[in-house]
Image (tube, rainbow, N blue to C red):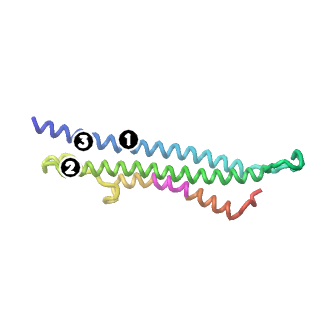
Amino acid sequence: MPEAKSALSVIDGYNYLRAEIKREDDITHQRLIVALTFQGFLITAMTFLLSNQWTFDSSAMIGPNRFYLDLATIRIAVLYGIGVAGVSVGFGTVAGIHAARISISKTLKWWNGKIGTMAADDRTLIPPAFELSEHGGSHWLGGASAFVIAYAFPILWAGYLVILACRGFGWR
């Protein structure tokens, strides 16, 4: 009877491991989908702002003492805002994916520690789980694609901001 209880706890532990990895992978997936959707919105807004002719008729100004910002200046400010939002969302996505990978890493360490305390016969029944950085395991490779996608956006948006800043307000 005690062996059945021990086997059940090992199976429960293994089920916990699989469920935790699936949960964190699902969270990573959701974070990427939301980030990609938001990035698509930002890219569309930026394209719209860059593609149209934005002129302002200064004769439409009411009264000589009125403060106004012409449409081109507002457009430039919004273009900078889009770039800042893109960088912020990109780094937020990177942080969220990193948090999910840390959670998986801790779960894998817990599991491998649990296997280390098992009797030699029980260890052969349950496969070890590879740490994220160990052996270039498949879980590390799967997580790498999420990081590549997540890091691409802040890097691209930062480059966009640098180019925009170098050109100054010359995009009128």
Vertical arrangement, residue 162 with respect to residue 72, above or below: below
Looking at numbered disc 1 in the image, what kind of residue is underneath it? Arg
- In the image, taking residue 57 as reference, residue 172 lies left or right, namely left
Label 3, residues with CA under 10 Å away: few <14, some 14-19, many ≥20: some
Q: Quadrant of the N terminus?
A: top left
Closer to the chain start, of discs 3 and 2, is 3
Looking at numbered disc 2 in the image, what kind of residue is underneath it? Ile
Looking at numbered disc 3 in the image, what kind of residue is underneath it? Gly
Residue at 77% across, 52% down: 72
Disc 2: which residue = 115
Label 1, residues with CA under 10 Å away: few <14, some 14-19, many ≥20: some
Task: Label 1: state its secondary structure.
Answer: helix
Disc 3: which residue = 13
- In the image, taking residue 8 as reference, residue 60 lies left or right, namely right
Task: Label 3: state its secondary structure.
Answer: helix
Which span of residues is magenta-colored? 146-154
Residue at 36% across, 42% down: 22
Nearest the eye: 55 or 33: 55
Nearest the eye: 134 or 114: 114
Vertical arrangement, residue 22 with respect to residue 120, above or below: above
Task: Label 2: state its secondary structure.
Answer: helix
Label 2, residues with CA under 10 Å away: few <14, some 14-19, many ≥20: many
Closer to the chain start, of discs 1 and 3, is 3
Residue 7 quadrant = top left
* Residue 25 x, y percent position in the rendering: 40, 45
Query: Magenta part mainly helix, strand or loop?
Result: helix
Closer to the chain start, of discs 1 and 2, is 1
Q: CA distance from mark 3 to mark 2?
A: 10 Å
